[in-house]
Amino acid sequence: MAAMITVPSYSPSIWVRMCHALPRLDLSMQMRDNIFAPDSWEYQQTLLILSSLSAIALVISLLVVLSFLIHYCCCHRGDRSEGSEEEDDDEDGSTGHGYSGKKGRGICCVTWVAVAAVTLCCVAIGIGFYGNSEAHDGMYQLTSSLLTANYTLASIDLLISDTITGLQLSVSGPLSSMEEMFSGSKPFLVSTRNCRRLSENVINLLSSISLARSSVEAGPGNDSSVSGASITPLTPVPPSVVPTVVPTSSLLPSPFTPGWAANTLIVNEDYRWLSYVLLLLLDLIVCLFILLGLAKQARWLLILMTVLAWLALFLSWGSLGLETATVVALSDFCSEPNTFVLNSTQITTGTSSDVLDYYLTCSRSMNSPFQQLLTQSQRALSSIHTHLSSLDRNALPQFPKAEKSLREVQQILNSTEGNFHQLVALLNCRILNKDYIDSLKGLCYDGMEGLLYLSLYSFLSGLAFTAILCSLPGAWRSFPSESEEYDDSDSESEDPFTSHQDSKRFLQWQPWL
């Protein structure tokens, strides 16, 4: 079991180790282990506790925003009375816009706080776009590896089915005809029957391979079902269209095949990617329109953006909770992936642990669990070839009518040997193990990094929107109302000295005039 902890060419990243080392508490506040067990209620409790940290952060944000709102509501009347007294004292030095003294400095401070919060939100949005792209790249590599593995398993199934069908065809067709022709010659009849026995032996050996639980049951009783079959070269389906091809037999029974898993992940990943893009665009639109509202001093626009900022605040802290649980669960899986894959696959499919261990670890010290079966099959095919060569040299001169049947058997044997050599290469652990390692790297490297960036985005955006909601009410309530702007414009138009004083000041500024 110690060999299952590590995978060749794969080692957990530092982020995986750090997240995996986080302490785990259940709902009763007792320490739990960090073994990945998604079906366990105790393990799900630890994830709930970790994701609830974002709910605590949301409550703190709401309390902070609520305290600022209470401050604005309770202190606004006092600030208004003080502002009116300062306006009377500074009436001569005012510019006509109503912003002077302490009130003007307060408005400037609130505005710059809102601008700083919007800037932080924009930085978080950039981080979110990068993290979403990294997570999407990791899922793409994972699904590509699963599709390639599904293509390999489908090719293995087709090779075994083609080999079994060809041998059954030779047993039911030309070899039976040759037995009838050589019935008067015992040596030739014995060689023909040996070819038949060896062919049936190869059929039984290939049918016992666990990776190919074919729907065609091997055995002499199925001769009539394939008597009209024909042998065609094997042309496996390319990986780009593998999701539409579900092999009749594979390491995992239908629908638990790599192709089915890849299809499910592709659909879920598309929805996840699109959801984050919409969330990022919502945050970006809110930030841009907040800046526009501050620049134009549009009170109605800032009020509308305040409502949307509340929505973005809840979405930010909510997404952080989901990302925290996902990151921790993924780190637990990526720390020891073979253990979970071995146990879950063995329980679900009943596949031998030796077969799974061979393909997951692909250690040089391990022998293939199919080595003995393949060796016996190869020896049986070689013996069939020897018997056919002997019949070709000795039987054809005496029985020329047997040439057609003998040539058919030789043709089937050549096609069978070609498929068998491809089968031996595909059953080697290096092909499937490479796909397995590539899927782990995509999920545990790029996928993990993308989720961490998305968690950082959610955290920063939550802080930014908290600051925005604290500053926006003070900003838009400090803007002059339409009646105030109208009174200012009327006073300026009715004052006969305003234009004269401005002209005089302009002339003093231009010394050459």
Image (cartoon, rainbow, N blue to C red):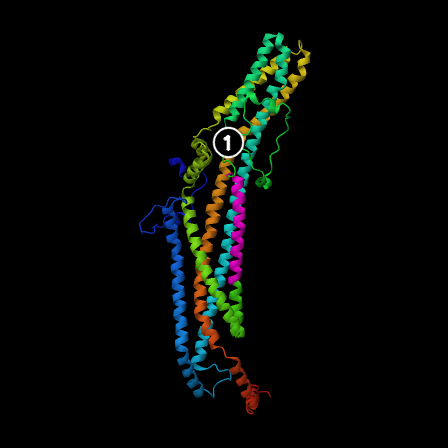
Residue 409 placed where, x, y %? 62, 19
Residue 30 placed where, x, y %? 31, 50
Establish if 98 lies above or below 329.
Answer: below
Q: Magenta stretch: dominant SS? A: helix
Establish if 141 lies above or below 359.
Answer: below
The residue singled out by tag 1 in the image is 211
Q: Quadrant of the C terminus?
A: bottom right
Residue 461 placed where, x, y %? 46, 61
Residue found farthest to the bottom? 496
What amino acid does circle 1 point to?
Answer: Leu
Total numbered circles: 1
> Does residue 145 appear in the picture of this structure?
no
The answer to which of 67 and 506 lies nearer the viewer is 67
In the rendered structure, the answer to whether residue 397 lies left or right of residue 92 reads right
> Does residue 166 appear in the picture of this structure?
yes
Q: Quadrant of the N terminus?
A: top left
Q: Which residue is painted at 59% across and 18% down in the image?
A: 385
Q: Secondary structure at mark 1?
A: loop
The residues colored magenta run 256-283
Q: Determine which quarter of the picture holds residue 39.
A: top left
